Amino acid sequence: MANQVPSPRELDELAFAPHLRRFSGDSLRGGMFDTVHIDGVDFADERVEETSFVEAALSAVSFERVRMRRARLNDVWLQGVRMVGCDLAESSWLDVEAARGVFAGLEAHGAGLRRVTFHGCKFDSVNLRGAKLHEVVFHDCVLREVDFSGAALTECAFPGSRLEQVHLHQAKLTEVDLREATAIEPADGVDALRGAAVTPMQLLELAPALAAALGLTVKEAGEPLKGAVRRGSRSRR
């Protein structure tokens, strides 16, 4: 997968920009947001499952403790969006572009993301267990304690991004490009990195974790091994 990521687009560069209507409400009730621009609105403590955003733009919007299970985002532009403590489990993201966003304490297990690009976003304690990510790019992002356990990542890339204490237990990676990531620190499931591409230097940095996963003991020659029998020693009866 090529890592040439274009710069995030501005609102007026969107193909559907001329058709956008300005959102004037303060609630997500109604659940259908088609060709709408939501700007500078704070949503909190709402429950609007199966919400749909189609050819929509959201700028400087805050979501706190909002439950949007099975939400659908299709051709959506997000800039400066903040999602904290929200539930987007089993949501569907298609052709989504997000820039300078914050996603913290987000439940997105079982979500499906396809052709999604994140620019300069911060992810903290995001649950993506069992999610399916296809052609997803994290560009200049920070992913801290993101849980990819059991997830399937296909043709994904992380140019300029930091992966800190990410969980990969039983994740399946296919053609995942980590070569331009600035840090790769798996909290677990390092063996799931099969199917990913790394640089020789990254491989050296991952060596201790890989050795531990394989059960290898790495010691200099001559160093005693715990419980080892000395050469030439005989067991006493």
Image: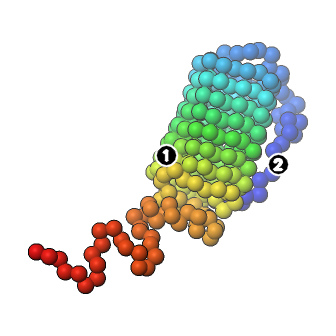
Is 116 left or right of 176, judged from the image as shown? right
Q: Quadrant of the C terminus?
A: bottom left
Pick the residue in front: 175 or 208: 208
Q: Using the rendered image of the protein, determine whether residue 228 is visible from the camera's viewpoint.
A: yes
Q: Which amino acid, by three-letter code, is at mark 2?
A: Ser
Q: What residue lies at 85% left-to-right and 35% top-to-bottom?
A: 11
Residue 3, by quadrant, is: bottom right
Q: In the rendered view, would you say 38 is above or below 113?
A: above
Q: Which residue is mark 2?
A: 7
Residue found farthest to the bottom? 232
Q: In the rendered view, would you say 117 is above or below 102?
A: below
Q: Whole-percent x and y of residue 19?
A: 85, 28
Q: Which residue is mark 1?
A: 149
Mark 2–mark 1 Cα distance, whole angstroms, equals 30 Å
Which disc number belongs to residue 119? none
Q: Which is closer to the viewer, label 2 or label 1?
A: 1
The kind of secondary structure element at disc 2 is loop
Q: Which amino acid, by three-letter code, is at mark 1?
A: Ser
Residue 9, by quadrant, is: top right
Q: Whole-percent x and y of residue 50?
A: 59, 25
Q: What residue lies at 72% left-to-right and 54% top-to-bottom?
A: 160
